Each structure stands twice: as C-alpha cells, then as structure tokens.
Amino acid sequence: MSRPRVVVVGLGPGDPSLITAGVTAAIDRIPVRFLRTERHPSASLVPGAATFDHHYEAADTFDEVYRHVVDDILAAATEHGEVLYAVPGSPRVLERTVDLLDAEAAAGRIELEVLAAVSFVDLAWVRLGIDPYEQGVRLVDAHRFAVAAAGERGPMLVAHCHNRRVLSDVKLAVDDPPVEPVVALQRLGLPDEAITTVEWADLDRTIEPDHLTSLYVPALAAPVAGEVAAFVELVATLRAECPWDAEQTHRTLTRHLVEETYEVIEALEAVGDGGPDVEPAAYAHLEEELGDLLFQIVFHTTLATEAGAFGLADVARGIHDKLVHRHPHVFPRATDGLVDVEGSDDVVANWEAIKKEEKGRDSVFDGIPSHLPALLYALKVHKKADTVGLDLAAEIPSAPTALAAAVESPDDETVGALLLAAVAMARAADVDPETALRAASARLRDRAKAVETS
C-alpha cells in the first residue's frame, strides 16, 4: 500500500509572474489543494484551496498553528492519497510547516515532494544591491531573533516582521543598538513595494509592518546575547591571569559546584511556585545564585575547551539536540516502541525508554548516580520502578503499616521501609519529599532558634 503523498509548492514573494512553471503544473494536476494562508498576493492562483487561516486565530502560539496545519494536511493526504500544499515564498526558506512535514516523511508516514520556488530573499538581494554570499548575510526569523541571532553582529536579513510587537521584540533583544540605520523591505515585487531606511530606536514606530515585511541589518554594535560570549571570555581571562583560577581542576571544583547547587535550591525555596506575589528581593537572590552556578558550568566547560574536548556551544547544542530527541511528541519522528502521549506520565515513560536506548543500558536504573543523598536516591528509584510496571503497592507497605512496624521493632530494615513508604506517599500526593523534608526541617530550626534566644 502506497503512502499518502504531499506536494509542497511555493507561491513566490508576491508577484504572480514569479510563479514557476513547475508550480503551475502541480496546481493544475492536483485537485485537493491547501493554502497555509490566504493572505498572499498569489493565493488566487490556487483556486478551490482550503486555507489554514482559522488556526492563526484560534491558537496561542505559532508552534501550535504549525502543528495544527501539519495534522490537517496529514489527515487530508491519508483520505485523498495526494494533496497539494501551497506556502508563501519558497518552501525551503523559513517555512516551519515544511520542516515538520519533512520529519513525517523521515518517519515513513508520508511521501513528500517539495518544488523549488522564488523566495523574497532573491528580490531582497537585488533591491539591496548586495551579494549575500560575499557579504556573509545571515537569514533570521524575527520570531526567534533573540535565539537565532545569538552571537551575530550582522549583516542579517530578518524575516517575518509582520507587526509592531515583533519589531519591538527584535529591537529589545539588542542591548547596544547599531549606529548604522537598518532597511525595511516591504511587499517586494508588488506595485506598492516600499524600501525604507529606519533608525534602530524608531524600528517599531516609523514603519507600518505587514506579512510581507523584512528587515536588513548591516551591522550591530555588539552581538546579540553578547553577555554570554563576554562571560566565557572572562572565565578564560581568569584562568590565564588569576593564580587561584589557574590552579583549579575538575576535581577541585567539585565541592564548589555542589555548594552552589544547594544555594540555588535555597533561593528557589524563597521563590516557591513563582508569580506576582514573590518579593523582588527573592528573585534578585535567585538571579545571583543562578549566576554563581553558571560560573561553575562555564568554568568546567573552559577546562574542557583547554583540553580540546568541547566548548560552551557544544554543551548548548548537545542539550538542545537531546531535548528534541526525547520529546518526539513535540518534534515528530519515528516512535516505534513508545506510547502515545496523553499526559505527563506518558512523557516520563517515553523519556526513560529513549534514555535507555541512547545510553545502551540494560536497565533504567543504571543511570542513577550512586552518590545522591539517600532521600533523593529513593525518590529516583521509586519513579523508575514505576516506569517498568512493578506493582509498587504490593512491594512497599503503606505508611501506617510501615510506621507501626518501625515503632514495634526499630531497626535498619523497618526504619528504611518507613522512609521508603513516606517517599511513596509523597509521590502519590504529588509532593516532592526532598522539598517537604527541607521545609519541615527549616520550621524545626526556626522554633529551636526561638527557644535558644528566649
């Protein structure tokens, strides 16, 4: 049985004359047609197409929109065998839905054909009079500007600047504004095309953006997220010029990492679940302690860089890719052997299965650090035992039963069973036992201090 087939075509930057012959032929051949959005000058060239504009109105985020669009396309392709999906511009230029369809094709659920198309960037280079390869221009999505442009000084072409809020986010992501004006490119190739030079401070004030607006940034005074790069450079300088920092090794820094971690935990307790009622001083303390912990992470990374092992970018890339791989319900791929995600318990079960496969381990328990504090160790064992199907209710006595046994005959076994029963009870009540015990100990400390000073 053949797989459902999706043919993706691009409608170019706006001018209907820029539609390719291949795209026109595909539109004529395939009767079941879809448009990502009808808000495009060439949308009329796809007659009878259903649009996904309603998802933009109903969803809270663009990620939700794109997922709904892809789900609808998959359902239609399954029903009809083959569908045409038309997107603005080029299907391979900042088109997230096509990336998601690519993942579906890689997982073997559909056949995907993507036809080449003219992009708005082709007109942008002509209007700007530059060679993007010679200039080294980076293409960036405005919705991900703070992340996608991290470390960049320009030049950059920033796409999807469709409203003032997006332009404001772009502007605020840069702490040190560029001296040179930027260029707003709007409706390229259409009769009302506009190319405007704009000062950075007026970015979200001067122009009236629309869905065909992009921004050319020749140069920034400092890279986006330059603070991180500056911090890495600072640690390297300390290693080179400070006697104490120069003497440190991974082993000598271990106790500092543990201490800073516990100080972060203490700061987190003051913040609690967060929200507007938290005192500003609590957040200020948390910010400081997170900075101290970050210093430890960057220090260890610097030592690894000196050894030629890896750098901070490798660490960030590694955790990024790991999180993507362990969330197949968010970033689709082949999921043989995994359960369908309906809630957080399913996410945890899949996480453990994927982690076990990644590490090549025989057991989900192999990755539990042996040096964890006993209470945290018990909690991790209990959680992992839950994922393998063990009947925990039969294995662990109830808290009252365990308490009675410990009171009658207190020894290592009965007291250990009582503590394990307390961990099970805490999990059942969705209470973190580590946090609960720490809070109870703090209350006892405070009462004892009051007696001590009375």
Image (tube, helix red, strand yellow):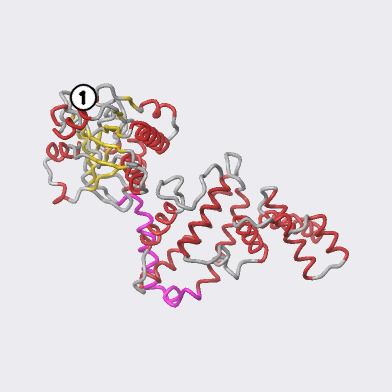
Nearest the viewer among 282 and 366 is 366
Q: In this view, does 308 lie above or below 395?
A: below
Q: Name the residue under label 1.
A: 45
Q: Which amino acid does label 1 sit on?
A: Leu
Residue 83: x, y in percent? 30, 32
Residue 52: x, y in percent? 36, 28
Which residue is painted at 41% across and 34% down in the image?
Answer: 68
Element class at badge 1: helix
Residue 378's image quarter? bottom right
Nearest the viewer among 415 and 314 is 415
77 relative position to 401: left or right: left
Please give the range of residues in magenta: 223-252
220 relative position to 271: left or right: left
Residue 74 within the segment the image draws in magenta: no
Q: Quadrant of the C terminus?
A: bottom right
Magenta region's main secondary structure?
A: helix
Q: In which quarter of the image is the N terminus?
A: top left
Which residue is painted at 59% across and 61% down in the image?
Answer: 262
Which residue is painted at 34% across and 53% down in the image?
Answer: 226
Could you classify mark 1 by the number of other residues whose Cα lies within 10 Å: few (under 14), some (14-19), or many (20 or more)? some
160 relative position to 253: left or right: left
